[in-house]
Image (cartoon, rainbow, N blue to C red):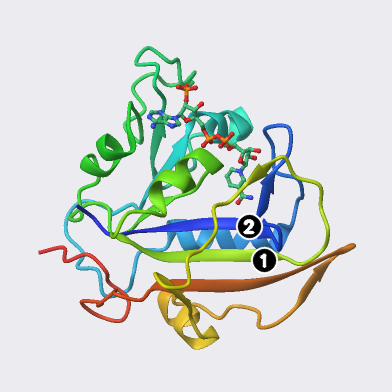
Amino acid sequence: MTNFGLVVAATEELGIGMLSTLPWRIPKDMAFFKHVTMHVPKEFPSNQTTPQNAVIMGRVTWESIPPKFRPLSERFNIVVSRNPTYDLQLANAQQPSTLLVSSLEEAFAAVDPQQHPRCFVIGGAQMYRLAIKHATCTHILLTRVKSKVDCDTFFPEINETDYRLASHEEMEAYVEQEVPRGLQTHKDLEYEFTMYIRRSFQPVSPTIENHPA
Ligand SMILES: NC(=O)c1ccc[n+]([C@@H]2O[C@H](COP(=O)([O-])OP(=O)(O)OC[C@H]3O[C@@H](n4cnc5c(N)ncnc54)[C@H](OP(=O)(O)O)[C@@H]3O)[C@@H](O)[C@H]2O)c1
């Protein structure tokens, strides 16, 4: 099975959502999310087809994305629902960049390391809870929202025997761009970019976690 990462923004209490939406709007975190989920590692071999990362999300998270922004562009969107006839309401029903599946396992099976250099589970709580237990969940990109924000949906506990907090340099090497260091502010919110790595993770190369061979 393909290695994958989680991308999340969470408070110190691990709050991630409120009333089925994001409880904040942090433009630099949205830009970070976009970069992380879109970026194809520089070492990824180029061939005729343009590689795109895969993003896996639960049905509630899919619905929380404004219709004009979904599917998330330049990414292979995989939506998980128990309802096999769920209507993704795509403007173009032939959207090749979007797939409906009925389990997380089916989502991973749809990811082809030759076409999808990286795979990320992007929420919500139900998906994170299932995904974080997988041995192939190698990275957690966690934007820590330091301010108190009311939430009704929570990210699972990060077990420190399984994951370690990575250094800022390790995070920058993984995302292949500079990341603002330390406490950031947006209006009355304080936040910080962090990353966790699974302790057992052995990279094939510093930036490619799946062998595209
Ligand atoms: N802060 C962040 O970084 C972040 C990121 C993403 C989302 N969020 C927030 O998280 C909240 C949504 O999270 P959520 O936990 O309520 O929903 P979710 O994980 O996005 O989606 C839940 C849905 O996924 C499907 N599902 C769950 N387990 C399944 C399984 N084992 N097999 C097949 N399908 C399964 C079900 O869809 P059906 O009901 O259709 O069967 C279920 O209702 C929102 O507030 C959102 O804004 C926050």
Query: Label 2's element?
Result: strand
- Quarter residue 102 falls in: top left
Figure check: 87 above or below 195: above
Q: Residue placed at 57% from the left, 64% from the top?
A: 142
Residue at mark 2: C-beta within 8 A of ligand 1: yes
Pick the front one: 49 or 147? 147
Name the residue beneath numbered marker 1. 144
Figure check: 3 above or below 71: below
Figure check: 111 above or below 79: below
- Furthest residue toward left: 213
Query: Label 1's element?
Result: strand
Assess whether mark 2 and mark 1 are in contact (beta carbons under 8 angstroms): yes
Q: CA distance from mark 1 to mark 2?
A: 6 Å
Evaluate whether residue 128 shows in this view. yes
Crowd class of label 1 (few under 14; some 14 to 19; many from 20; radius 10 Å): many
First of labels 1, 2 by sequence position: 2
For the residue marked with disc 2, what is the amino acid? Ala
Q: Residue placed at 66% from the left, 61% from the top?
A: 29
Crowd class of label 2 (few under 14; some 14 to 19; many from 20; radius 10 Å): many
x and y, in percent, of residue 74 in the image: 42, 47
For the residue marked with disc 1, what is the amino acid? Arg
Q: Is residue 189 left or right of residue 111?
A: right
Figure check: 45 above or below 177: above
Name the residue beneath numbered marker 2. 9
x and y, in percent, of residue 94 in the image: 33, 22
Evaluate whether residue 124 shows in this view. no
x and y, in percent, of residue 131 in the image: 39, 49
